[in-house]
Amino acid sequence: MIVLILGCGRVGARLAIALDSEGHDVRVIDQNVDSFQRLPLQFRGQILTGQGIDDEMLIKAGIDEADVFAAVTNDDNTNIMASEVAKVIHRVPKVITRIYDPIREEAYHALGLETVCPTALGADLIENMLTQAATVTNGKAGA
Amino acid sequence: MYVVVAGGGKVGFYLAKTLINEGHEVLVIERDRRKADGISEELGSVVLRGDACEASTLSEAGVNRADVVAAVTGDDEDNLVICQMAKKKFNVARTIARINNPKNERIFQILGIDATVSSTDIIMQQIEQKLPAKSLLHIRVLEDADIELVEADVSANSTMVGKRIRDVKLPTDTLILVVAHAGETKLVNGDTRLAAGDHVIALTRTKNEDVLRGLLLA
């Protein structure tokens, strides 16, 4: 599988390392060269320095032959725009967009992007943990 | 008309000022407190402080009753998201985005933005018109139709010199419309002959511009 990852932050780098070790053809784009330090020496994928919303950059990275595009920079709007370019213009079969803002995530999910909202996921998870803890405490108190 | 201007930088400020002077109802959305305060001081209470990319801000701005949303921040991706949110979530009839990187113009059109304004392109055109260099000058570009109106001075080496227009093989969809010769401006027909130094105005497709340039200026 050819996978393009936009953004080599913690999430992008971790994703890149995991997919690379599974034997996929991974290309990571980041505008900051220092970000690639998150990748280990044995990383076999390709690294490209540049802006992800630059169409020429995406073409250079091989977007037209990519099976997957994941936009995981720390800027919601960059992720949205890059994902739309990947999906609408380059027809990448699978496009995943990280959006921190839950309202924007909901809006773009409704518009057809496959979105991940770490804010909502994190809050829900923590809330679940708290609710469970409360149930357990209540149970003990009741016993 | 109710116009929501997203972005209160120089472009947003002067746009708002002009629209207010023309009698329109205007609201500027600006994230930065200092910029927002500056606009309030100059133009009165026409500023909403907030992030125009967020649906809650757009809702507070009453975007659903706006006739036009103009996104004029310095970030193309922000302008895209603002226009898309306004259009898709609030059904705004007309969205206009400022584009800073000319490469994004085509992308914005494909992604459904009604109109784009590229500051870089405008500056380039203005400078181009002031250059004496031998080239085609763009008078007007109709992006939607991929058609442009250009002008040029026919060079002495041009293969068109002395020939009738009907005998010249012009690229497809290309028309030589007007010729100015020795101070006299005329509409061109098939029998018109061009002379070196004539000033012509022509209509062509963007993709044929190079061929036309070759014919007129070679």
Image: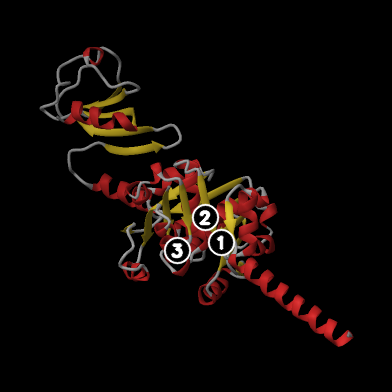
Mark toward the viewer: 3 or 1 = 3
Q: Residue at x 62, y 48 (%)?
A: A111
Residue topped by disc 1: A99
Q: Are marks 3 and 1 in contact (CB under 8 Å)?
A: no
- Side (left or right) of B135 relative to B105: left
Q: Earlier in the sequence, mark 2 or mark 3?
A: 3
The amino acid pointed to by label 3 is: Gly
Q: Are marks 1 and 2 in contact (CB under 8 Å)?
A: yes
Mark toward the viewer: 2 or 3 = 3
Q: Secondary structure at mark 3?
A: helix
**Chain ID of residue with mark 2:** A
Identify the disc placed on residue A12.
3
Q: Earlier in the sequence, mark 3 or mark 1?
A: 3
Q: Residue at x 37, y 70 (%)?
A: A38
Q: Secondary structure at mark 2?
A: helix
Q: Residue at x 42, y 37 (%)?
A: B143
- Side (left or right) of A38 relative to B11: left
Residue topped by disc 2: A80
Q: Earlier in the sequence, mark 1 or mark 2?
A: 2
Image-quadrant location for residue A66: top left
Q: Nearer the viewer, residue B169 or A52?
A: A52
**Residue B35 % position (x, y):** 51, 73
C-alpha gap between disc 3 and disc 1: 14 Å
Q: Is residue A38 above or below residue B97?
A: below
The amino acid pointed to by label 1 is: Ile
- Side (left or right) of B164 relative to B120: left
The amino acid pointed to by label 2 is: Ile
